Amino acid sequence: MAAGGSRAFAWQVFPPMPTCRVYGTVAHQDGHLLVLGGCGRAGLPLDTAETLDMASHTWLALAPLPTARAGAAAVVLGKQVLVVGGVDEGQSPVAAVEAFLADEGRWEHRATLPQAAMGIAAVERDGLVYALGGMGSDTAPQAQVRVYEPRQDCWLSLPSMPTPCYGASTFLHGNKTSVRLGSGGGKSRPQPCRVSACLESTRPPRDYS
């Protein structure tokens, strides 16, 4: 890959987040960086939601998440940010799915996941949200692939991944959804794994605008 020399890249420093946290969920929407949930200094999941205006370098507080959670997935759907799964104050995976309506500054509940999970890998394609893998309440990595249809507000099941995993990275390449790395293994001792798989879709795009 041609990088164009090191001078083509530069780091930019932004103001620190108002709320200290780990395992927060991040999404970028229209020049704003949203940081949602996570665990605070007490080690408990937060309902805190904040956004950084990347042009003015200013942090603003958003309406709190209806469900405090850490380790969730977030996907941008136009003017909405969909937050999927995560773990609650009892260290149990959650099935809750909520949408932040950016133009209205408020949250709405959406159809819950078929099975509670944290560490889901999620990506948007053609107005649909694909949620892959994760870890369930039995602490076992999952192989499930679910797709969310915003217009019907429902989840559908797709063929499972060859290897169960959670905390993986996912990206789009043409009509393929690729999954890389993540953790797998058994229930008692999840292990790093070398997952590399892709889900090919021949489904024509839908208009969900």
Image (cartoon, rainbow, N blue to C red):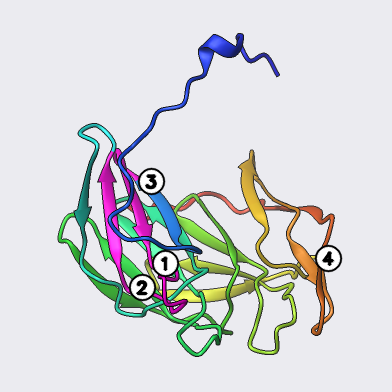
Labels 1 & 3 near each other (Cβ < 8 A): no
Q: Which residues are magenta?
A: 29-53
Q: Kindly indicate whether the residue at mark 1 contacts the one at mark 2 (C-beta within 8 angstroms).
A: yes
Discs 4/1, front:
1
For marks 2 and 3 on the same chain, the one whose residue lies earlier in the sequence: 3
Earlier-in-chain disc, 1 versus 3: 3
* Residue at numbered disc 2: 98
- For residue 137, side relative to residue 12 (left or right): right
* Lower position in the chain sequence, tag 2 or tag 1: 1
Number of numbered discs:
4
Estimate the x, y position of residue 194 in percent, counting from the top left.
Answer: 84, 55
Residue 65 occupies which quadrant of the picture?
Answer: bottom left
Above or below for 90 versus 133: below
Q: Secondary structure at mark 3?
A: strand
Residue sticking out furthest to the front:
41
What residue is shown with label 1?
83
Look at label 3 and name its amino acid.
Answer: His
Disc 4 marks a residue whose amino acid type is Pro
Foreground: 97 or 43? Answer: 43
Report the disc number at residue 28: 3
Q: Are marks 2 and 4 in contact (CB under 8 Å)?
A: no
- Residue assigned mark 4: 162
Q: Earlier in the sequence, mark 4 or mark 1?
A: 1
